[in-house]
Amino acid sequence: MNAISFDRVVLGFGGREVLSDVSFDIPEGSFTGVLGPNGAGKTTLMRAILGLLRPAAGSIEVMGEKPRRGDARIGYMPQQRRVDPDIRLNARQYLLASAAGKQWGWPFLSADLRQAVDIAIDSVGGAELADRPLCDLSGGQRQRLFIAQAMLREPRLLVLDEPLISLDPGHQRSVVELVGRLSRERGITVLFSAHEINPILPAVDTVLYLGGGHAATGPVDAVINNETLSRLYGTPVHVARSEGRLFVLAQDCEIHSHLHDHEVDARPEVVAR
Amino acid sequence: MISFLTYDFMRNAFIASAAAGVICGAIGYFLVLRREVFAGHAISHAAFPGATGAALIGLSPTLGLMIFALAAGLGLSGLGEKVQRDAAIGIVLSFSLGLGLLFLHFYTSSAGFATGLLFGNVLGISHRDAVMLCVTSFVCLLALGAIARPLIFASLQPDLAEAKGLRLDIVSNLFVVITALAIAEAIQIVGVLLVFALMVAPAAAAARLTHTVRDGVLLSAGAAVLVSWISLILAFYTDWPASFWITALGLGGYLAARATQAKMAR
């Protein structure tokens, strides 16, 4: 059974085609790393799965149904915006707002809802963080609580958009471990986008590599190799291995360095050596 | 008996500023959460030609205020994030004041009218107007309560709220209607130019000092009422304008909140 199936999907917005004729299947319960340079369509692909963007052609199935906005079976974590230091709300307020946010009317929170938030917070071991102001938490602690938020009401699919952004290596590791554990223990399918493969290598089952409007899927070694990536980029690409880490190089440039900033940019990221 | 409460105009001013303070404090807190305080500023400026225009054609200035504030709010909300909002707001703001000035130019009956509109005239509020303020405030509070949960979600995490199927445009339009009504109230207390004092200063202080939305709204509303009441008393004894005291206490309160929070953080 597939959690997500793309069949000859064309996706674009604002007159720009981001993915053209993309087909792949993601098996249920798998941890899939979504990789590719900035602007390759990682966020666009996620928006399509969430039903926020309709494909121009082809069909998408998410757990046997067409994507629809507000699908309760999906837990979503958008790319994080900056946190305003002037607003000192505690982290629990964000989760409560998310759990109650679709209900109009008399604004009181039910015991059931508060309990659902407690359960989600406990699932990431965040009980001690939840009542501190969000702006006082470290990036890693914040991400932990936003993962709790995505876990609200026990989804079957987690869609996480760049959860490692601007985290130091230690926090990156703990976030990947946490999501890997949730996926394994509860059989949740995870779609986890990242700038580079190395931090998520310990947890991924498959990778979905986007580039040049196309996609390649499969186990890490079947995708991140010279032939597949060269075909995807349309230019000779060399994959180097060193101490269990992977480096993707185009001739004498490194395409994916682990040292780069995170500006949203339409160009493939090529860092000169 | 406190001596200033023996005067009708003082009693009316206390009632009116409590009514306006509660709703402005509550709305202001959400404006701070949504980083939209300047939209509030612009709505209040846009209401100015409404009042002067209504006076010019012999209608109630309060009615003109409300209609123009609503139209400006919905217009801004409709612009959304498609255009550069800072520039759009700034242009609307200055044209509104210009238009208001033009109407005043033709409506030459009273200079006090213009000053009252721009800087507020809380001590000149009639009993009937004070009661009207209470009614509007109550309706606005009920409406704000009814949209509170989607509003908080959309304000704190718009990307996620959209993905969860919340219609951000509906939330934003409903909020802006309530905001426009609250601003029309605030103008009657502190005037077009000083709405910030009642709407943003207590709210910004409250956002720094509280950790839950409920506490933030309660503190913000309470502080707005307290600031206006103390200002009325100070105005009574000093004979300085009440609006001055509201702005001064607003600033003082905000600075005190910053200092307190910095101390707590250490």
Image (spheres, coloured by chain):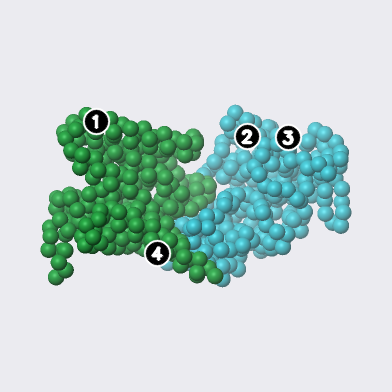
Write the residue at 68% across / 32% down.
A20
Between disc 4 and disc 3, the foreground one is: 4
Disc 1 element: helix
- Residue B105 circle label: 1
Residue designated by label 4: B215
Percent x, y of residue B140: 29, 51
If the image is split into quadrants, where does the N terminus of chain B sit?
bottom left
> Residue B217, labelled with which disc?
none
Mark 4 and mark 3: Cα distance apart in space: 50 Å
Q: Nearer the viewer, residue B25 or A69?
A: B25
SS type, badge 3 = loop
Say whether marks 3 and 2 touch (CB < 8 Å).
Answer: no
> Disc 1 is attached to a residue of which chain?
B
Residue B22, visible in the rendered structure = no
User: Which label sits on residue A11?
Assistant: 2
Q: Secondary structure at mark 4?
A: helix
- C-alpha span from label 1 to label 2: 57 Å
Residue occupying the point 67% across, 37% down? A266
- The chain containing the residue under callout 4 comes to B
Residue A191 falls left or right of residue B58: right
- Say which amino acid is labelled 4: Asp
Residue type marked 1: His
The mark lying in front, picked from 1 and 3, is: 1
Amino acid type at circle 2 is Leu
According to the rendering, which colour does chain A have?
cyan
Judge left or right: residue A78 versus residue A261.
left
Indicate which disc, 3 or 2, sits on the residue closer to the N terminus.
Answer: 2
- Give the residue at mark 3: A212
Distance between the alpha carbons at the discs numbered 1 and 3: 63 Å
Vertical relation: A129 (above or below) B75 = below
Q: Residues at marks 1 and 2, common chain?
A: no
